[in-house]
Image (spheres, grey):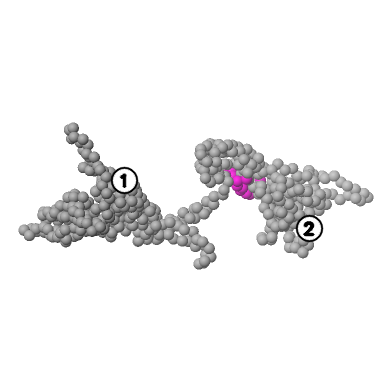
Amino acid sequence: MQLRSDIILDEVPHKIEAMIITGKPAVQAKMAPPKGWVRVSDVWEILGYTYNIPHRVLIDPPAKIVIGYDQTLLPAVTEAIALFYYDEDKHEWIQLEQPPGYVAEEGQIAAITGHFSIFAVLAKPGVGPIEPSPPPGQPGTPTQPTGPVTPVPQANFIVRDLVVNPPKIDVGASSTITAIVENTGGLSGEYTATLTLDGEPISSKTLTLGPGESQPVEFVVTPGLPGTYGIDINQLDGQLEVIGQKLPLDYRQPVYWWLVVAATTALIILIMLVRVKSTVGARVAIGAGAAGAGAGATVLLADALKEIHIVPQKPTVGVRTSLQLKAFARYYNGTEDDITKQAEWKSSAPATAEVLNDKDFRGLLFAHTPGTVIITARWKNKDASTPVGVNCNILDMPVAFGVQPMRTISAVPVRKEVDAINIVPKNATIEEGQSLQYRATASYTDGRVENVTEKAVWTSTNDFVADIDTNGKARGYAAGITAIIATFRGKRGTTNLNVRRRRDDTS
């Protein structure tokens, strides 16, 4: 990009244009060169823009800028010539580094820049032999220098010893790219090393090196796609092979590791300082400002609720049998709580198998007809479910003996819906070791009453106090109260059984 006959920009991205604002006489008086340097060119302000709208832009990768200077302004003995830019925030001139392998030409100087700014060429006077005056009678006679010409020192950088470790990785793994940057020149300067993968810039680092100094530069890459990548650090080439399956995230998307570290540190501090006594999952919202100033970041505490699950999973039961299901809450810190009594239970097909939701009998399942149902438990906006299979009992299946034909099952008209189940006796009392026969009757919506004692499913809510068999006969074991439940076709009847100590028990 030729801005003037004496100002050239090379290797600038094609979308970026530039223009020169010359002069700035009002501010040049404030731009005094650094101590020990003199200005040997005009002060140029180069402004970059895109889409014809001037504004400050960055150049990535850095471009080469060449600016001419007035040789008549050079000191008699010049130690160094360099290109500087003016930092308007710090109000000082900053020296730019020269391109690798650059050989200075008379009347111009080159440097590497990553941005547009105010530029000028400065020269540093040196100490050298004093030129003798012309002999008398020969005024103005030119004389040859009596000593050797002092070379102008420059900063010169080379990149060497590129290492890709390891050179072959799996997708999602990391490889470290290192190289040595050395200043082989005689002047200190800055050098920007840029890492590219397949020609695309990934990261840059700037080093400041004195004459003869060298320093390693290191980059870490984590490609998200399999393939073979060309590695380049300022024209020093290498190769990285990545194998495996494609990851959802592309490696080209930047990962702000400092945010990850900060969030992890904040989480550890919160866990150490805050102990939530409730078993309810807690969330701490860390806002980015005053209330209403924007969305905050949500951090999950270790004892926040993670999920709930049902035990047992995928059980199989027989017709006219019951099963106590349990629900447990699992937290992020690995602990669990029994929430059977707090969860809300539901069956996908109550006619096949129902699950109780009463306060004292939550999770208790009763099987009625063969089939499969889905049992769901819900707590704190979390759901858990399991399929339950209901099979025929062997006693309900037709059996053949000898030469007798198999018993056939004829079609029977469907009865009316069961309206209620009644258990007798009500609220009975027995002593430890005694038995009691219960009787269950079903009342239908058409007014009929049926004895379903042997058809109902009998359950005791506290088998330590008393249990009950499939025919409705209860037996007391220890003093206390238990509920006796009879379930038939989705309806249930309930009564209490009081077991007291034997009268001859003096303990």
Query: Is residue 297 found left or right of 235 in the rendered image?
Result: left
Label 2: which secondary element = strand
Whether the magenta-drawn stretch holds residue 203 is answered as yes
User: Within the magenta stretch, is there residue 143?
Assistant: no
Quarter assignment of residue 102: top right
| C-alpha distance separating marks 1 and 2 | 90 Å
Report x, y in % for residue 469.
17, 50
Residue at (21% x, 35% y) in the render: 405
Q: Which residue lies at the image location 15% right of the left edge and 55% below the top edge?
A: 438
Q: What secondary structure do most residues of the magenta stretch adopt? A: strand
Say which residue appears at 82% left-offset and 44% top-offset. Answer: 146
Q: Residue 371 carries which label?
A: 1
Residue sitting at the far left: 504
Say what amino acid the circle numbered 2 marks: Thr
Which circle marks residue 260 in the picture?
Answer: none
Let me know if residue 210 appears in the view: no
Answer with the quarter of the image where residue 242 lies. Answer: top right
Mark 2 surroundings within 10 Å by alpha-carbon count, few (fewer than 14), some (14 through 19), many (20 or more): few
Q: What span is in magenta?
A: 201-218
Residue closer to the observer: 238 or 381: 381
Q: Name the residue under label 2.
A: 22
The residue tagged with tag 1: helix, strand or loop?
strand
At a point 60% along the width and 39% down the height, the residue shown is 231
Q: Where residue 372 sits in the image (x, y, percent)?
A: 33, 46
Q: From this viewpoint, is residue 450 visible? A: yes
Estimate the x, y position of residue 260 in percent, counting from the top left: 50, 52
Q: Which of 27 and 314 is in front in this view?
A: 314
